[in-house]
Structures are given as structure tokens and as C-alpha cells.
Image: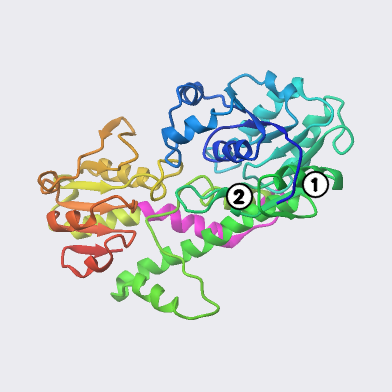
Amino acid sequence: MEQAPEYKMGIIGLGYVGLPLAKLFLEGGHTVYGIDADERKINMLNKQQSYLSDFNRKDIRKLFSKNSFHVGTAFDVIEKVDVIILCVPTPLDEQHQPDLSYVIGAAQSSLPYLRRGQLIVLESSTFPGTSEERLKPMLESTGLLVGKDISLAYSPERIDPGSKWELEQIPKVVGGVTPSCTAYAKQVYGSVFNEVVLVSSPRVAEMTKLLENCQRYLNISFMNSLLKLSEELDINLWEAIEAAGTKPFGFTKYYPGPGVGGHCIPVDPLYLLWKAREHHMDLPFIDLCHQVNEDMPGYIVRRVEKSLQPKALNESSVLVIGVTYKKDVNDMRESVALPIMEHLLQAGVNLGYFDPYVKTLKIGETVLHSTPLTARKMKNYDCTLILTDHSNIPYELLVAHTPIVIDTRNATGKMAERKNVILL
């Protein structure tokens, strides 16, 4: 790891990307000024409480142990820092087009406090061209020139919530607007990451992030297509995938599921599709994948309905297991559980759910509370529907005490051989 001077870091956005990044820079001996528009997060941090499943109270307390971590909602601290990193959301709008309002808002709020010698890095997932076409003109509207007075780079976040990967072990891709911008960013990230991978421009770095997630999107979507065919052919697709995975070359295992969720996989491909259409091109693979995954909630509901027959949906009780987008995290962004549960409620199902990370959930106008997993409670339901395979769920108990278990994640493993388990 390269040696570098101590930096004063300004990290805008203290969510699933920004807070782990702040932790890493603090551990590297730097000072961090964290900014977030969400006062709830700031209040919880100041009370040394966590709002992320990857951080406990001890972790939060440790962030403040050396008096090098300062958090707030005001942007005036930007004038104190050497490096500004934007880790804000980049969702889709109602038309499934890029919503850069958080990025633009964070940049605009920073403009009055910019000074010569600062490095600005965007880490939020976005389409190629964002840094140079959107951010650069905004920054230069202050009279400060990128590459001369200030530096601008893009470095895609690669955080995997709930995984065992330490952040510093994940190679950091960096692309600056000019060679001097790249060199500055390399020095900063090299102070805390084991490896920094340099690319020729921000556009290449932005494409790198989309490429990583598009690959997963396409392959998961393909498996979801095969899931429907496997039902017709009476084939256990999970078994076939494991068998194919024994080939020592040329095959990578991807798995089906109830859909795709999170802040990257269902969003990033549509950013790339939007950019392609801006250049009068199309990406039919992404269009097809989007159609496949848009249909998955309806498909899951149809499978539930089929499994419960001859009992009708509006006469049935269903207990959903796991509602976050991914196992062992408390992140609800783009969770496919939400549209599935909404479909079930609209069909008149008496719906309950259990998730160790989500105590209360609002689906439309309906407010639900996580149901304790006891044998007595589970016997009140006609069906258990596993949508997120959290590690700390007693699957044996579910199978033993629920008449029907529909498993979309292969969480029941060898228990799937039992007659009351339906593996999708």
C-alpha cells in the first residue's frame, strides 16, 4: 500500500457506500467530515447508534474514538477538506430514466465552498459521461479549472453489503479527467486500498461499474427465464446449475430468484440503456432482461396461487420470509419482495412476514409488523414464501410447521426433498 500524507476527507452521503468508506479512511489515519441530508442518520451517529446492518454500536463508537470523525448536514465544512467524495443515491425516475438529482444537488451545495487544490470524486453508479458532461461544467462555473485548479475523477463503489469482503481488499478503479487528476486520486485511494487500478478516463471507470452489474443482470435474468421452462419440464434448475458448476472451465454459476433488487443490478443496466438511446442505439439484451424481471413478481404470485389450489388466494394466509433485497442486510432498496407482497394483498391474501432486519413494513396503505417465528404462529398460515434467505432463519422449523413452503432461494437445501417444500 502506497504511503500518502494525511488528508481531510469530505464524504457526502453516509449510507451503504459512504459510511464504510469513512471508516476505511479513518482507520488510515485521515480526518473525515461526513455530510448527509438525512437528519435521522446524523442524529443516530451522534448518539453512536447504527442504521446499517454491517455496523453495530461498537463499530459506530469506534468511528468517533479519535475525534477525527465529524458529521452534520451543513456543507460549509467542504472548505476545510482536501478531498470531496460523492456517495449519494442515483435511482431511476418513474419513467425508468436516470435521476441525477442527488448528485447535482450535492455538487451545487458544495460549489460555494470549493477552493484550489481540492480533489472531487464521484463514486455513485451512473452512465458514462456523467463526470465530464455534468459535473465538470458545474465545478468550472466557479472559475476553478479542472486539471489546473481542482481535480475531478470517477471511482466506482464496489461495496458488497453483508459479504465477508473487507473494503480495502477490493481493487479500486480510478479514472481522472486529466493525468494529474488520476494521479491525485491514485495517491488518495492508495493510502487505504491494497490495490488501485488506473483507467484512461472517467468514462471508462463509469462503464466499468455498469459492465460489472450488467453481466450479473443478464445472467440472473437468463436463469429466471429458465426457471419458468424448468417448471414445465419438471426439472430442478438448482440441481442442474450445481451439476454444470462442476465443469472446471467456461461456466460461472448464477442463480434464479424472485427478481433482482438493490441499488445496482436493477438500476445500472437501465442507465446504460438510456445512454445508448441518447446515441440512437439500442441494447436489446437489457430490454429483454428488464421484461423478464418485471414479470417475476407476477410469476411468483401465480406459483403461490397454483400451490394453494384448490384453496383460493383470497381465502389463504401466506407468511413471507425475508423482505430485504439481499440476505443478511437491512437494505430495502428495489426489494422485489415489495411488489410481490403488494400483488398478494391485492389478491385478498391474509399476509404476514418475518424479517430479522425489518420490524415494520408499509405496503401501499397496509402496515405490517414482523411476525415472531414460532411453531404456533406458523401453523396459522397455509403457506410460507421464502423471498430472502437470511442466514439466521430457522428453516427446519419452517418446513416442520408450515403446510406448504415455497422456496425461491434454495434456502431449504436438502429439505427440498420433503413433500411440503416447493423449490422454485
Q: Residue furthest front?
A: 66
Residue toward you, 413 or 261: 413
Q: Residue at x 63, y 52 (%)?
A: 209
Choose the circle earlier in sequence order: 1 or 2.
2
Residue 237 location (% of width, % of height): 36, 71
What amino acid type should be assigned to the residue bearing mark 2?
A: Glu
**Quarter-wise, where is residue 335 in the image?**
top left
Q: Is residue 258 magenta?
A: no
- Which of labels 1 and 2 is toward the front? 2
Q: Quickly name the residue at label 1.
A: 182
Q: Which residue is mark 2?
A: 168
Please state the horizontal and vertical placement of residue 78, each as a whole percent of the image. 71, 24
Residue 294 among those drawn in magenta: yes
> Mark 2, residues whose alpha carbon is within 10 Å: few (<14), some, or many (≥20)?
many
Q: Which residues are magenta?
A: 276-297
Rounded to the nearest angstrom, the CA distance separating label 1 from label 2 is 19 Å
Residue 309 screen position, x and y as percent: 15, 58
Residue 51 visible in this rendered orientation of the protein: no
> Residue visible at 58% across and 32% down?
13
What mark, if any, has residue 64 been given in the picture?
none
Asked whether the viewer can see residue 147, the reply is yes
Q: Which residue is rendered at x = 17% and y = 56% of the image?
A: 308
Q: Residues within 10 Å of mark 1 (few under 14, many from 20)?
A: many
Label 1 sits on what residue type?
Thr
Residue 121 on image: x %, y % = 71, 39
Name the element at disc 1.
helix
